[in-house]
Image (cartoon, rainbow, N blue to C red):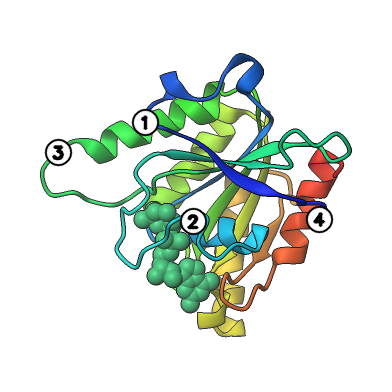
Amino acid sequence: AAIKEVEFETRAVSMKTLPSGKAALPEVVFVGRSNVGKSSLVNMLVNRKTLAPTSAVPGFTQHFNYYAVNKGRRKSPSFFLVDVPGLGYARADDGRMDSWKSTLQRYLGVRENLRVVFHLIDGRTGLQKADEQLISLMMNENEGRSSYVVVVTKCDKVNDKKLKGVTEKVRQTLDKNGFPKTTPVIPTSAKSRQGRVELLGYLRLVFDV
Ligand code: GTP
Ligand code: MG
């Protein structure tokens, strides 16, 4: 694919400070539960081991982190990959989770330059409550303005039978929420790099890179 170069662009703590005006490029966001492998997938896609910081401890990514692809290149379209906090990380005391969930809801609903949403689901645990909520947010808030791709992660840890079960449950839930049968559900692994070609192919379709 035509990811020629990628660099850290900016970090934002809230919707108010996201790139805007001339600084805004089309963007691709990685959403899902904490620890599902969002930051790892960003690194896998762009072939950079430590671009997006990762951790075995859930709740690690705390901001909107923007990575610019092909910035300023004339021949390759440029866009942002956006790594964000995960859902479902219960912090004992504060209301952080609720506030992140409503921020994400708003982001999916109003962010005009949001072109692609990768929704990551952990292949080991399968669909959880937070995932069902995300699917319904995509239907009700985003209303099809962004391309939507479900990504099953950590498939190096999952056997075929388990993966089949997880995928079927995802399909049923997509159906129930009114998504077309063509909605992609793609098995991946940041470790073995399974699914990389498919996801890049998808970006190529959307961005014509
Ligand atoms: P938060 O920022 O906390 O929301 O997490 P995240 O979704 O960004 O997850 P992150 O990429 O930090 O990965 C969480 C843990 O899962 C790390 O220990 C990763 O090494 C591990 N991990 C991520 N992807 C894979 C994968 O494909 N296979 C395996 N085996 N482990 C993975
Ligand atoms: Mg992260």
Relative to 131, does residue 35 appear above or below in the rendering? below
- Of labels 4 and 3, earlier in sequence is 3
* Residue type for callout 2: Ser
Q: Are marks 1 and 2 in contact (CB under 8 Å)?
A: no
Q: CA distance from mark 1 to mark 4?
A: 31 Å
The image quadrant where one finds the N terminus is bottom right
Dot 2: element: helix
Residue, disc 3: 94
- Of labels 1 and 4, earlier in sequence is 1
Q: Are marks 2 and 3 in contact (CB under 8 Å)?
A: no
Outermost residue, left side: 93
Q: Quadrant of residue 147?
A: top right
Which numbered dot is residue 13?
A: 1
Of marks 1 and 3, the one in the foreground: 1
- Of labels 2 and 3, earlier in sequence is 2
User: Which of 115 and 81 lies nearest the eye of the viewer?
Assistant: 81
Q: Please state if 203 lies on the left or on the right of 132 as rendered.
A: right
Residue, disc 4: 201
Please rate how many residues cluster around mark 3, counting C-alpha atoms within 10 Å: few if below 14, some from 14 to 19, many from 20: few
* Residue type for callout 4: Gly
User: Which of 57 and 198 lies nearest the eye of the viewer?
Assistant: 57
Could you say where residue 126 lies in the image, as x and y percent from the top left? Answer: 47, 66
Residue, disc 2: 39
Of marks 2 and 3, the one in the foreground: 2
Q: CA distance from mark 2 to mark 4?
A: 19 Å
* Residue type for callout 3: Asp
